[in-house]
Image (tube, coloured by chain):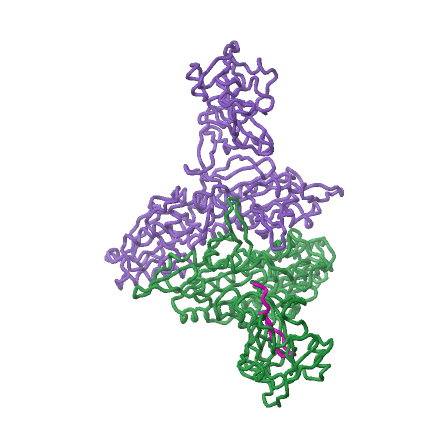
Chain colours: A purple, B green
Amino acid sequence: MKLANLIGQRFKEKPADCVIDSHALMVRGGFMKYVGNGIYSEFPALRRITAKIENIIRKEMDAIGGQEVLFPVVLPASLWEESGRYESVGNELVRFKDRNGSNHVLGMTHEEAAVHLVREYAQSYTKYPFMIYQLQRKFRDEARPRAGMIRVREFTMKDAYSFHTSQEDLDKYYELCFKAYNRIFQKAGVPEVITVKSDSGMMGGSVSHEYMLLTPVGEDTIVICNECGYRSNMEAAENRVENNTDAATAELQCIETPDCKTIEDVCAFLKSDVESSCKAVVYQKNSDDKFVVAFVRGDYEVNETKLRNLVGEEIHPAVITEDDCLVAGYIGPYNISSEAEFYLDVSLEGIAALVAGANKEGYHYTGLNLKRELGDVSYADISKVKEGGICPCCGKRSITIKRGIEVGNIFQLGTKYTKSMDMQYTDENGKSHYPVMGCYGIGVGRLAASICEAHHDEYGPVWPVSIAPWEVHICCLRADDEETKKTADGLYNSLLNDGIEVIYDDRKIRPGEMFSDADLIGAPVRVIVSPRNLKESSVEVTTRDKSVKEMVPVENAAEYIKELRSRLFAEIESHVENF
Amino acid sequence: MKLANLIGQRFKEKPADCVIDSHALMVRGGFMKYVGNGIYSEFPALRRITAKIENIIRKEMDAIGGQEVLFPVVLPASLWEESGRYESVGNELVRFKDRNGSNHVLGMTHEEAAVHLVREYAQSYTKYPFMIYQLQRKFRDEARPRAGMIRVREFTMKDAYSFHTSQEDLDKYYELCFKAYNRIFQKAGVPEVITVKSDSGMMGGSVSHEYMLLTPVGEDTIVICNECGYRSNMEAAENRVENNTDAATAELQCIETPDCKTIEDVCAFLKSDVESSCKAVVYQKNSDDKFVVAFVRGDYEVNETKLRNLVGEEIHPAVITEDDCLVAGYIGPYNISSEAEFYLDVSLEGIAALVAGANKEGYHYTGLNLKRELGDVSYADISKVKEGGICPCCGKRSITIKRGIEVGNIFQLGTKYTKSMDMQYTDENGKSHYPVMGCYGIGVGRLAASICEAHHDEYGPVWPVSIAPWEVHICCLRADDEETKKTADGLYNSLLNDGIEVIYDDRKIRPGEMFSDADLIGAPVRVIVSPRNLKESSVEVTTRDKSVKEMVPVENAAEYIKELRSRLFAEIESHVENF
């Protein structure tokens, strides 16, 4: 198409509200427009990208036997009551009443709808296994939408649901889907996406993986072992800590530590190591505001996800007043009020002599030995892994911490939904069972934005050819020059006839503006037709990533461009793993 | 794919809640599943159909220069406040508050979002004209969802919006879109879809057309002139009535008509013609409950749409109590209470001596001459056209009334939205103007269901090949017979390799069940491989519409089927008008 007709304007100024590059570039490039908090419209250039991503996904889902279906965006509350999530999910679930006063929700994920669709169909074991998927809009009322299309409230998602008669069968299919997901990201031009173990969160189930595109602006923290390849989302990463268990014990003493409210204060005052100190982080249960105290070694942080899973319900950071049973700044595990629930992190295990709060204003214990003082103590893993920490897989001190954007996830759901919604099948012997489920999600818009984040320069996106809005961008540098215009027109029509996707800029504007627009649009192949080039009977062909820059004779130009395009596709394909 | 793996069950019993054939067949055939009032999930068979319809639409929209975009389902109320529709649209617009208490709506149409998207882009006349479209879910909280996918609350819609610098330019594009719509329905296999003039309703604007698929179960009433080709939705159809203006007048008399509360009672009691009687139909304004009385000739019905447009606001059927200013059963235009607003229909014009209520319990006037009694009266067109009525176009008594399903509509919106949302462009002379808009909608699911309604027999849908879930259905009648199975497998694989869409039934079930499943799935070409046919070294090839039934030698079968499929596509193409 002609760039002059492309709907969506490009501009130079970085929008004030854009904190990450991809967001700024996708706004500046005329890809998306803000409609409301976490809600965007897609201009044609982005819609072309998301359509290509959708088709890549469809192909891979079909290849592993998936059947495309469509669930509604609006669901009756009764469906979510069946699973229990109408109550258990928080504010991110939009609930509303229709004109007749019936409760409805906006689908933020479709496990309930999936079970509802196949509950009658799959009553016999002979129907299993099977997988259904859809590409559909979802709405999650996120508290903090951010980073453009990375964390939005409304988005297009591919969500797939598989059903199995055994855990083994799910494992097998999960592995297949794992590979299909790799292929999707490879085909979309981001073979660098890695998988990490993840926390299953509100989805239920046990085993789960996230697909992460590593980038410093990612909102997820990823734990990677460079030795053995262990990878996990920080939320789910096991923390291993080795303390010197041979150190000498000491006498328990209660010492006055005036104005020492932080670990740093106390260590400085007592001239002790932070590694021998015990830090208290206090939460309250959402249900009854009861205090939950997490004790970790002074140099560790609490991993709230692991703590929440341990507590078994929602918690929030505590507000402690003078009337409460806890003495803020002086909380320790010994002689703590029985009204508070407390957990000891593995990082405290084996420390012979700890410094810890004495649960008394202005006092700390020294020489605290948890085993000696508390008797039969148990430790739980509720802390965050640190850079240089011990890999839980290979045991080496080889942990590095990176940041990434989650571009997909796969979950083993078990029977959480089939049980709660009473979906059963009959086996060979006429016995009833609940099928086990897997679910598999990819956010389409987020993937597009993540690819932009991982593949851009200061001038614009560098789209992989497989998802680029157009494959070739022709700049006719002097549309008022007859020969130049004729050559550019000819090339445009010739490429179009061969089925190449071309955006053609024949506007009568300055070259600088033309090039900066081309940079912002980000098509992988660029062709510059100009009077200067034509003096040499050539056009200039470059790639957006600057790896190619060639003068090509006009008569070979179309052929050369087609070959270059094929080469770019082949490059993408070379990263695609076969089953 | 193998039918054994197809998700969705088929069954014999007609579901109790299905009042029209297509609904029953699409439920029985495993196409759709009820989720909630007016909310359905699509099984794979239907998703394949809707995907094909979507692609047919995309192609035609692109062909007239449309650019695909995507608007959100959830829109901030502020956008709808700009256009005024946040207030003016009734209960069908779902309004809800998000977690922060901000008002939002579920998009039921996207004029506001369209203007919002291009408002900055299209500030110069040089950008015009242009058209954007999307395929997106919509939610309308219909009071009475019915007939399966025909009238639902949530649906996928293609909605397009065009922008122009003049009415002439809109007219030109409207004509183009008019043709593109014809092509869409022709390509979808329903060339019999007709266009009718329609009422613009809440969309604003003036000229509008609906695309109607005629069927006795349609919920729209269509007025057709068999002489001149005039076609209109009943809502918008002009009613022409010729009364005998030469008839003699009579003296006005107020006559006791005890217990005569209906037109029939009065005419019987007074031995007068219904054509000389004046019927009162009473409404109230939604805003203040003020009475609005529509007077029509006794043998006509009130057209509420035309009346509503005339009144200029929402009205509802009245409830009249004894305390009100109107005397139920005896309401007439002469001496009517000044508290009520009243309108006289064109069907009353020129009647010399009317029978009408006397606005007094138990009394009617006879000999009422509106011009004589009321003075300078005016008449408005607020009645429904009748079978055999006068065509407003050619003037002949040639009107027939049909029923149809609206499968698409096109509207000229004028500047309603660009003005209210302050979208302006600058012309060649630097002067600002509001662009004029057109909008163009097609409901995807409704079109699928309508095609089923128009193309089915008692056993199932007869899908046109261009939108059929599969093109060919192979029945292997004795999958336990080695040669039969081998032949059927071979044919299946051969057709698949040639890119034909095949559903293959190799289940070990009775032929009757196999055939009734094939009928319910409705693929246009059926191939029966059976030991009996193979004795003659042949397979049986039929079409779902029974126009073809051939024994074809096995070695030619694949070729014959491909040719038959091409013939069916050619048949569809033969109905497609070119521009």
Please state the horizontal and vertical placement of residue B430, each as a whole percent of the image. 30, 64
Placement of B123 over or under B254, stated as above or below? above
**On the image, which quarter does residue B385 sit in?**
bottom right
Say whether residue A155 is magenta: no
Report whether B119 appears left or right of B150. left
The spot of residue A493 in percent (x, y) is 37, 62
Residue A291 visible in image: yes
Q: Quadrant of residue B405?
A: bottom right
User: Vertical placement of B463 versus A371: above or below?
Assistant: below
Residue A164 position (above or below residue B376): above
x and y, in percent, of residue A269 in the image: 42, 15
Q: Which of the two residues, B505 or A100, is positioned nearer the viewer here? A: A100
- Judged left or right of residue A423, residue A490 is left
Q: Which stretch is magenta?
A: B288-304
- Position of the N terminus of chain B, as image quadrant, is bottom right
In this view, A103 is above or below B408? above
Residue B299 is a magenta residue: yes
Is B393 placed left or right of A536 in the picture?
right
